[in-house]
Image (cartoon, helix red, strand yellow):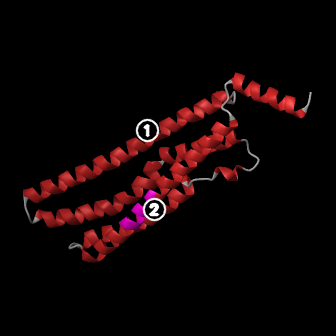
Amino acid sequence: MTDEDAKKAWQSSVAVGGALPPDLLRHTADKFYRRLRLRNAVEYVACVIVVVSFSIYTFTLEHVLQRIGSAMVVVATFYVGWQLHRRASAVDPARAGTMPIMEFVRAQFVRQRDALNSIFWWYLLPFIPGLMTMVMGSMALRIEEGMDGIVRGVIGLAVMTAIFAGVWWMNLHWAGKLQKHIDAIDALMGEG
């Protein structure tokens, strides 16, 4: 049996066994990498916008608690940007080296799934103290307005809570989708 015969036999066994062809796996890895790079670029731009906006608020808002809360949000944004890079940065498939592409793709799916599953702790929670401090400053100003001001403050707090809950749920949803891909790879590798 020549090397070419062995290669053809291996390729046909991969097709029979239901494994994805290497070209399709490479395409999947490249597509996932591009999506992560785009997502992270959007997140980093959002971080810049938040830092600039809340830095301005630190000096322009009326109540001292609003200004302190704004500064806390700026610090939280730097922390979240660092965590995003540390936990969920895109890893180029070319860095797989000698690792089989299926193992590389699985490892990247696991890494992103873990980042999404823990999003509350490193992405949402850091903003809560600063935002709550800002809300307390706003509520202090609204007390003077009477009941209408307090109602507007409570509505604002409810909207903020709903947004945080929505972001948390959406990320857990995407983590579940990644888990399905991980399970499919495990089944192909005979580990599931």
**Would residue 33 be seen by someone viewing this image from the given angle?**
yes
According to the picture, the residue beneath numbered tag 2 turns out to be 44
| Secondary structure at numbered mark 1 | helix
Residue beneath label 1, please? 173
Residue 88 among those drawn in magenta = no
Q: Which mark is residue 76?
A: none
Query: What x and y, as percent, mark residue 31?
Result: 56, 45
Q: Is residue 158 left or right of residue 129?
A: left
Tell me the SS state at disc 2.
helix
Q: Position of residue 146 (x, y in %)?
A: 7, 60
In the rendered image, residue 186, in percent from the top left (x then y), is placed at: 64, 31
Picture coordinates of residue 161 (x, y %)? 29, 49
Query: Residue at left 69%, top 27%?
Result: 190
Residue at 59%, 41% in the rendered image:
28
Residue closest to the eye, 37 or 77: 37
Q: Is residue 4 above or below residue 127?
A: above
